[in-house]
Amino acid sequence: MSGFEQLKITFFEECNELLQNLEGGLADIREGTTTEDTVHAIFRAVHSIKGGAGVFGFSELIEFAHVFETVMDEVRKGNLATSPDVVDVLLRANDTLADLVDMARKGDPVAPGFGGDVRHSLNALLSGGSETAKKPAQAAAAAPKQETEEFSFTVVKADNFDDAPQTDQVHVYSIAFRPKPDIFKKNIDPGFLLNVLRSMGKLDLFADTSGLPPLAELEHDSLHLSWNGTLETTSPRAEIESIFAPVAADCEFVLSDLTPGAAEPAVEVVPIAPEPAAKPAPVAAPAPVAAAPAPIVPAPIVPAPMAPAPIVSAPVAAEAPPPQQEATPLAQAVPANGKEPRGAAAKQASSVTIRVELEKIDRVVNMVGELVIAQAMLHQVVDELPEQTSARVSNILSDLVRHTRGLKDSVMAIRAQPVSSVFQRMPRLVRELSAKTGKKVQIEMVGETTEVDKTIIERLSDPLTHIIRNSIDHGIETPADRMAKGKHEEGTIRMSAEQRGGRIVIEISDDGGGINCERVLKKAREKGLVDPNAVLTDDEICNLIFLPGFSTAETVSDISGRGVGMDVVRRNIQDLGGRTTIKSEFGRGTVIQLSLPLTLAVMDGLVVEVAKQTYVLPIPNIVECLRPGQDEIHRVIGAAGALNLRGDIVPLIYLADVLGMNQTVQERTNGVVIITEASDGTRMGLIVDELLGHQQVVIKSIEENCGSVQGIAGATILGDGHVAFILDIEMLSSMTCADGRNLLPTATDGTANAARLN
């Protein structure tokens, strides 16, 4: 991959982060929780997208971002108030900007006039605030003239990263980079270019401020900095030059290969004739970038075929510092994520991050999994050693177990991502569907910082999208209907995420009309999905909406009505080892709950024996284990038994029966009761024969070979080499509820309608 292609990939990756920042910042403004830092972060995000787009000549994206940026600049200066109407325009502008970025990523042509209505709205905001915008200029004219003496600056060291590649093919290059003063007017961000250059190896960079003009002649959109330094890298010369090739007409870039071990020579930058700085028009469209620039330096290419190092996402500031401040090292000028720090974060240095391909992390996760299996096997061997030898080895093994667990936790933390990356896509969907259906809907989001495995995050988007679409189309009423029912004309959809035990629970609720169970059951019988004589509970009827092809809509629209959306929800969640439940109250609203594992790789498990077979139960679902006496277990109609656990009645389930194993234990009441809890809080007591121990296990999917098996979440390899099934507590709980095994006496002491087991 060429350096230019790598640069483009980096640009779109950063666009994803910047668009998320934009969505979050605009949400803060809409909710009235905005600060100056928030507004500045939004401005910087739009500015960064425009600057990066200028490198590749995405003209439509550049032009739209330019207008968007100008409006945000007015907001930042206090010339434009963030009223609800203004915020609505900004949100629409953010949606259009995201669409243009996506088109540029895919290489799709932009249709003529695309986003024209939003651009017109942005320009209308600028026209309406033009009189206000004049006030700062007038104040500046009345202010006393600043002194015109030149400042005395020294060369400032900008960056020094100790990540030089440790190979025999390292080349040392001297770097001289001097952009033209009007480079910002061409919508090119030099900081973005230097950021990619830094990703290639160890960059020792100095900012030369000696070209700064007198203070009175400084302009905010002119650049008078240049950079000199050295780069140690394994990347070939041609790849480095290709980064600056698209902007060769707007800067001077000199690259010289230095002899290894030689002293660093002083690099002289050939001066560029200064150009008169024209006053920019208020909303003038930026000039396009040259599409076919000339080669930069006709120097021989030194091949060193190696992929560039991971990209360090800590951009170098590209604008001159404000004249009232002293020159500052560039690495400290702008935070790593392109946003201004907030609160306590403002006092801390920006953390340096790297971009790593997910495939590489997956390989590490797989290796950690194999290490866990090898550790379990080693533990098995140690148990078979003579006692004296075993004691000595056990101490070493304990250290290995501790370090393996720490390694596993660290790797899992690398894969974990906040659900905000998915949640923040939903407000736009709500806005679009609200406008299309004529309904007024707001969305509330709670627990966006809850972290879950990246694989799960990536596959949550479709289910959540279908749920939101269904909620707006079928759940939320029109403003007139809501007011007739005594509700607020604006409906509310609430999304929340939280960790419960070893799972993440996502709830999507609305205050709409709820599910009409009679209508759903009637439709299901008409479609032949339910036996005409079947008697179903309200919960069972509500779950019919997840059946393939089921829909209560009389007509099919482009929003919903084909009967595939909710089927996709359940199928995708089940593929992730999750469960979907739904609760609805007609006329009041609906709650859909998604319960998912935090990780799909490694977990802590309790190994048990049932009818001479070995199984694993997830530790996060286990509350406690006990061996009750025979007189503590009560028989209950419709259940295997019940246990009075400190005043709480817990249904008892013989695990052998649930799994279809007809073998019996000699004395069932002598078994061990494991109290488990599902994500919805439902408790049950699983009766097993023996507890074999606690062990970290690697989760292996069995669906490719065995399909989906009720009550089984996967399989694992134990220390003795045998395969054991991992039980799905969520599914076992729902299975027992469906079988009526959780019917309990109403009395809290468990004595009513109960008889002692004989």
Image: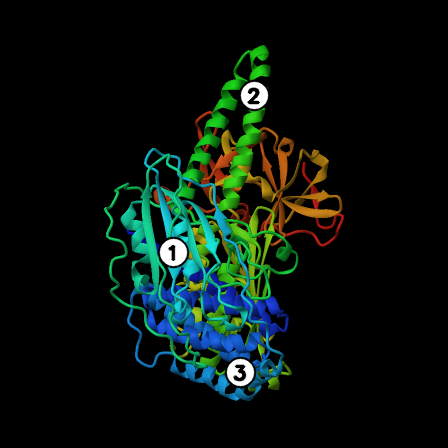
As helix, strand or loop, the secondary structure at mark 1 comes to strand
What residue would you read off at disc 2?
396
- On the image, the x and y values in percent for residue 66 come to 43, 74
Of residue 233 and residue 663, the one placed in the foreground of this image is 233
Asked if residue 538 can be seen in this view, the reply is: yes
Residue located 46% across and 27% down the image: 374
Which mark, by number, is residue 478? Answer: 3
- Give the CA separation, mark 2 to mark 1: 55 Å
Q: Position of residue 697 (x, y in %)?
A: 50, 35
Q: Where, by quadrant of the figure, is residue 366 drawn?
A: top left
Secondary structure type for disc 3: loop
Mark 2: which secondary structure? Answer: helix
- Which quadrant of the figure contains the C terminus? top right
Tags 3 and 2 touching, CB below 8 Å = no
Residue 282: image x %, image y %? 46, 81
- Name the residue that disc number 1 marks: 177
Label ID, residue 725: none
How packed is label 2: few (under 14 Cα within 10 Å), some, or many (20 or more)?
Answer: few
Depicted 330 relative to depicted 272: above or below: above
Q: Nearer the viewer, residue 165 or 154?
A: 154
Inter-mark Cα distance, 3 to 2: 68 Å
What amino acid is labelled 1 in the image?
A: Phe
Instruction: Give the crowd class for mark 1: few <14, some 14-19, many >=20 residues within 10 Å.
Output: many
Circle 3 residues within 10 Å: few <14, some 14–19, many ≥20: many
- x then y, percent, for residue 646: 75, 44
Residue 747 located left or right of residue 726? right
- Pointer 2 and pointer 1: residues touching (CB < 8 Å)? no
250 lies left or right of 633: left
Viewer-nearest of labels 1 and 3? 1
Q: Indicate whether 126 appears above or below 364.
A: below
